[in-house]
Image (tube, rainbow, N blue to C red):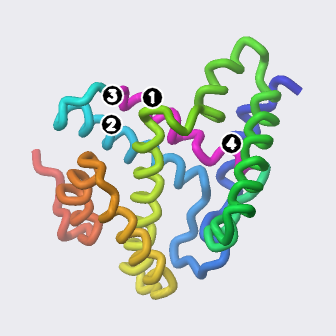
């Protein structure tokens, strides 16, 4: 059927993340994709406005919104399994590509080219690094939230993800980590009210 695409997309909210871990604050791929889009947009704005490198933050946000769309059909494969071996990772990438193609088939022909760029875009695209960094950043912030909620289940994932972020040479990511991540450690009272 070439009219089911958006009904499928709306089902992102039913696909849970972090399925092998006890979550104090459950997260689904719709929530995750929204946060990745916000973060990718921010990294794109930083790239363009702070570092003076041409960038389209809106496109980065759009790519990020759909970066896990294949999981509507595949589910969210836990990271330890997905990256257990190159063979498993390669096979899973093929499954993800097939799922994206199946989703594209649920669109009318006239709309497919626009969404094809978002679902099966080139991983060498200049925005891929922003979306990948935003994805890791979102995972790290999830770990911070879980720790703040008293859940020690995410401590190891937090350390591993922070190490990846710290080793990433992207200046946009370093800028975001320095200027914005510390606020995620604050509670609402520490954040304060928005002044008039």
Q: Which segment did they paint magenta?
A: 55-72
Q: CA distance from mark 3 to mark 4?
A: 29 Å
Q: Secondary structure at mark 4?
A: helix
Q: Secondary structure at mark 3?
A: loop
Q: CA distance from mark 4 to mark 1?
A: 20 Å
Q: CA distance from mark 1 to mark 2?
A: 9 Å
Instruction: Give the number of the mark in front: 4 or 1.
Output: 1
Number of marks in picture: 4
Instruction: Give the number of the mark in front: 3 or 4.
Output: 3
Sequence-first disc among 3 and 4: 4
Q: Nearer the viewer, residue 151 or 95?
A: 95
Sequence-first disc among 4 and 2: 4
Name the main secondary structure of what is drawn in magenta.
helix
Instruction: Give the number of the mark in front: 1 or 3.
Output: 3
Picture quarter with the N terminus: top right
Sequence-first disc among 1 and 2: 2
Instruction: Give neighbour class at mark 4: few <14, some 14-19, many 20+ (Cα, 10 Å).
Output: few
Label 2 close to label 3 by CB (< 8 Å): yes
Label 1 close to label 2 by CB (< 8 Å): yes
* Label drawn at residue 10: 4
| Left or right: residue 157 compared with residue 117 | left
* Label drawn at residue 55: 3
Residue that numbered label 2 is attached to = 44
Q: CA distance from mark 1 to mark 3?
A: 9 Å
């Amino acid at each position: 059927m070439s009219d089911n695409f958006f009904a499928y997309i709306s089902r992102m909210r039913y696909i849970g993340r972090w399925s092998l871990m006890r979550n104090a604050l459950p997260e689904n791929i719709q929530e995750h994709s929204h946060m990745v889009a916000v973060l990718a947009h921010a990294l794109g704005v930083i790239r363009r406005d702070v570092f003076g490198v041409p960038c389209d933050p809106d496109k980065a946000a759009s790519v990020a919104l759909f970066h896990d769309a294949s999981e509507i059909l595949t589910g969210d494969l836990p990271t330890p399994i997905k990256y257990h071996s190159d063979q498993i990772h390669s096979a899973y990438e093929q499954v993800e590509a097939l799922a994206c193609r199946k989703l594209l088939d649920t669109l009318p022909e006239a709309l497919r080219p626009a969404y094809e760029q978002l679902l099966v875009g080139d991983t060498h695209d200049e925005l891929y690094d922003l979306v990948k960094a935003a994805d890791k950043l979102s995972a790290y912030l999830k770990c911070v939230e879980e720790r703040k909620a008293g859940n020690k289940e995410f401590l190891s994932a937090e350390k591993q993800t922070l190490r990846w972020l710290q080793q990433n040479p992207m200046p946009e990511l370093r800028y975001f980590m320095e200027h914005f991540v510390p606020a995620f450690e604050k509670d609402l009272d520490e954040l304060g009210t928005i002044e008039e």
